[in-house]
Image: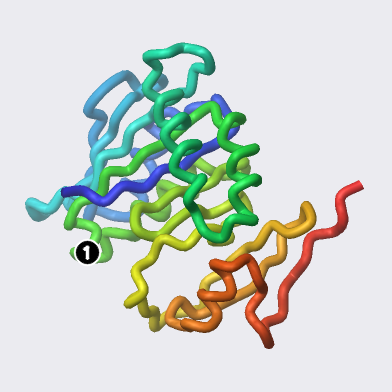
Amino acid sequence: MPYHMWYLTTSEERVPFHEFADLVDGIGETYSLTLTEGTDAEWVEISLAHRKADHPIGDFRYLPVHEGVSDDGGAQEIACFLEEIEDCQPACNVPWLRQFLPQVRTIYRWSLWSGTEVSNGWDPVRQLEDVFIDGEEAAVYAELEGWTNTDGNHITWEFTERVSWSGEPWWFGLHLDGRWHRFQMDLGDREGRDCFKRGVVPPGVKALVDPAPH
C-alpha cells in the first residue's frame, strides 16, 4: 500500500510538467519523471521512479477544487478533511484548519512507494515539493503524522506513542489567542508531546509568538 501526503494550496496556478521534468533531469540520471495523464500545461498525474532499478518512488496527482460541485474530487477531499479534523489534537489548532480548508483551490496528492527508501528516493520528492508550493500558501497533511500549517510547523499529532526521532527537533505550532506560538521539540519527548496535544507550550521551551493581529 502506498503512503499518502496531501499538499493543499489556495492558488489555482498549475506548474507545467516540463518544469518538474527539468528539475529531475538536473539532479542527474538517477531518477525518471513520466507524464502519465494529461498534457504538459494541464497534467493530471506524473510518476517518479528510480531510472536504473524497478523501484517506483511515487505518483503525483493534481486535484483542482471546484466549490459547490457535488461530484468534484477535490471538493470531496476537502469535505472529508473538514470532517476528520474535528477529532484532531490539539483542539486549539482545529479552528485554524476549519478556516483554511474552505479556501483551498488546489490539492497535490503524493502516493509514495518503497522507492522512497532506496538510494535517497526522498530527495526528488522534497525538491519537487519546493517547486509546486514555492511562494504559495500551502498546508500539508501526512498520513500517520498529521497536519503542517502554511509556515511549515507541525500542528496536529497523529504519530504513534512509540515514535522516536534521532534528527533535528521538529517545529511545532499552537494557535492561541489568534496567534501562532512556534517551538522546537523532539518527537520522542513524552512530556513535551503530551503538553502539545493539550494545547500547552512545554515547560522550559522558548516559543516564538506572532505579532498581535491588528
Residue 178 x %, y % = 78, 52
Amino acid type, mark 1: Glu
Q: Which residue is mark 1?
A: 117
Q: Residues within 10 Å of mark 1 (few under 14, many from 20)?
A: few
In the image, is residue 2 above or below residue 115? above
Q: Residue at x 56, y 58 (%)?
A: 155
Q: Residue furthest right?
A: 214
Q: Quadrant of residue 72?
A: top left
Q: Residue at x 56, y 60 (%)?
A: 90
Q: Quadrant of residue 11?
A: top right
Q: How is the image coloured?
A: rainbow
Q: Residue furthest bottom?
A: 204
Q: Can residue 136 be seen in this snapshot?
A: no
In the image, is residue 144 above or below residue 71? below
Residue 24 x %, y % = 33, 47
122 or 194, which is in the foreground? Answer: 194
Q: Residue at x 42, y 34 (%)?
A: 80
73 or 124, which is in the foreground? Answer: 73
Local SS, label 1: helix
Q: Can residue 41 be seen in this snapshot?
A: yes
204 or 46, which is in the foreground? Answer: 204
In the image, is residue 133 above or below residue 153? above
Q: Quadrant of residue 197?
A: bottom right
Q: Residue at x 23, y 35 (%)?
A: 34
Query: Left or right: where does residue 178 sit relative to residue 205?
Result: right
Residue 70 x %, y % = 42, 13
